[in-house]
Amino acid sequence: MLILCLAFSSNIFSQYATKADSLKALLSPQLNDSNKVVLLGQLSDWFYEQEDYINAIHYQLQKTQIFKKNVNEAYHASANEKLALMYYHIGNYELSAKHYLEALKYFEKIEDERMMAQISGNLANVYTRIDNYKNAINYLNKAKEILEKEQFFNSRTIAGLYTNVGLAYTGLMQLDSALLYYNKALALINETENPLYFASILNNMGEVYFEQKEYEKALADYEKSYSLFSDIENYNGMGASKLNIAKIKIQQEKYTEAIVLSKEALTILEKINSLFFIVTAHQQLYEAYKGLNDYKNANQHLEHYLLKKDSLKGNEKTEYIANLEMQYAAEKEQQKIQLLEQEKLLKEQELVIKETRFYIVIVSISALLFLTVLIIFYLKSNLQKNKLNQLLLQQKQEKLELSLNYKQKEVESFANYLKEKNQLLENLKKELANTNLPDNGTAVKKLTGIINQYLHIDNDRKNLELKIDQEHQEFVQRLQEKYPQLTSNDIRLCSLILLDLNNKEMATILNIEPSSVKMSKNRLRKKLQLSKEENLHGLLKSL
């Protein structure tokens, strides 16, 4: 079986490489621009179909570069839309939004309403991904105004649009508006023809009712969505909706029913290894067993919850780093194109200089010929030297900025993770301290011991301090040079202030009281000789 799988994979890779290589082989310097554009477009489309978005962007940018001299605005708008979608797939939402806006500008100019609606909807998706729900709703409304017109109306398309509007309003916690659009979406689709779509909307509506504490309505929607997911054997939907039903039972203090439902959901979700919902299942089982005062089982599921949540955090961090690497590769391709443009401009300038030299030689008298040649040679030498220095300086600056941004985000991510974990454990510890324990003292002591162990292990804090020391070396050096009177604790506090954490978050990380953080800040301000009007964070950031 292993041999067959390897042979099959090798065959697929061979077909993939053969197709790409055959197209690349046709590219040659002798080809005219029109033929190059066709081949580059085919290569970009091929890699896009294989979901290799980095290579797709690479060839699309080359294709766009050839047409820089082309003043055809329609072509550039189409190219911008393609690039925006590719950047969206790799998570570079800044470049995605930039190219979508460039394309939208053209289609608004020619009043192509269908394309305006399509791009506005895609822009809304970009803003939803970065939790900017207000901008998302603005662009969804623009798309809605167009798509609701008679000549563009399509019930399924409008239903999808209304669902996205509902999700955006849910993100803003404007629940009545979210519910209104979910109901509009349901009215446009058929349950029999689109069961998956119908079930997903019902599940979203259930969340709105749950937030409004209308638990009976939420339960009805969750149960209906579970039934539809079951009919089409959508396991992720089945597990999620069953957990939602269990969540209602916990609110109603029907803990035994909640345990049965959560265990059934856990069995479904473990089949497809849906880690996010598995973590949720263990959390709900912990809450249900705790409601029954069954601290032995509650303790077991709490341990599973903590372990799985740490694993989930690890997966999220790995995906985040991989996403950054993909963004960096895509931006690197963009920089290559810019360098080519600069090189082309410099060559054109050099050509102008050569032409000027030629005419000077023709019209100049023989006595000035030697001097003219020396001057041109000197200018050319300086031009090349300046060009090299500019390129080296630009590359160093870009590399430094990428490195600093990546390191800063990594430190912030690690600090937030430590803060969230310690806060969760503190809350659990306080809750256990307020629980009456007639018969299960031993189990709770064991659970409290586990929590204390997580709270007092210094590895996470030491790792955070090590990361801060590594990533803020230059900042610490400048701080010590300017303020030699600062202690190591003062410098540690300065690094946390630079991360823009509040007093409570810093207290959680340093394992002290918020009031102690406030006192330490006041002492630090005195050492830095700051007045009440001067901003401490602004001063540190300026360093």
Image (spheres, grey):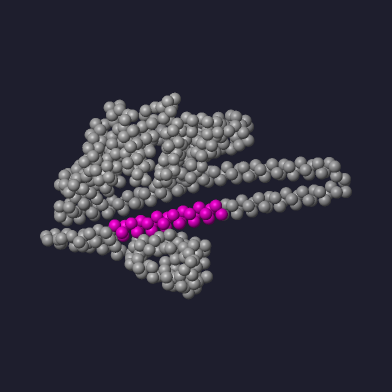
Viewer-closest of 410 and 106: 106
Q: Position of residue 237 (x, y in %)?
A: 28, 38
Corner quadrant of residue 143: top left
Residue 234 seen: no
Asked whether 319 or 542 is in front, the reply is 542
Q: Is residue 44 left or right of residue 181?
A: right
Q: Is residue 514 above or below residue 183?
A: below
- As drawn, is 190 to the left or to the right of 288? right
Q: Give residue 393's position: percent from left, percent from top.
A: 60, 54
Query: Is 127 above or below relative to 112?
Result: below
In the image shown, does 51 or 189 lie closer to the viewer?
189
- Say which of 279 and 182 sits in front: 182
Predominant secondary structure in magenta? helix
* Residue 531 in sight in this render: yes
**How many circles with numbers are drawn on the protein?**
0
Whether residue 418 appears in magenta in the rendering, the answer is yes
**Residue 320: within the magenta?**
no
**Residue at 43% from the left image edge and 59% from the top image edge:** 500
Position in image of residue 389 (x %, y %): 64, 53
Q: Position of residue 166 (x, y in %)?
A: 35, 39
In which quarter of the view is residue 74 placed? Answer: top right
Q: Residue at x 35, y 44 (%)?
A: 174
Magenta residue span: 397-424
Task: Give me the residue at 14% from left, 61% from top.
Answer: 437
Residue 24's place in the image compared with 473, above or below, is above
The residue most toward the top is 151
Q: In the image as oriented, which residue stretches furthest toward the left?
A: 439
Residue plotted at (48% across, 41% down): 96
The quadrant in which the N terminus is found is: top left
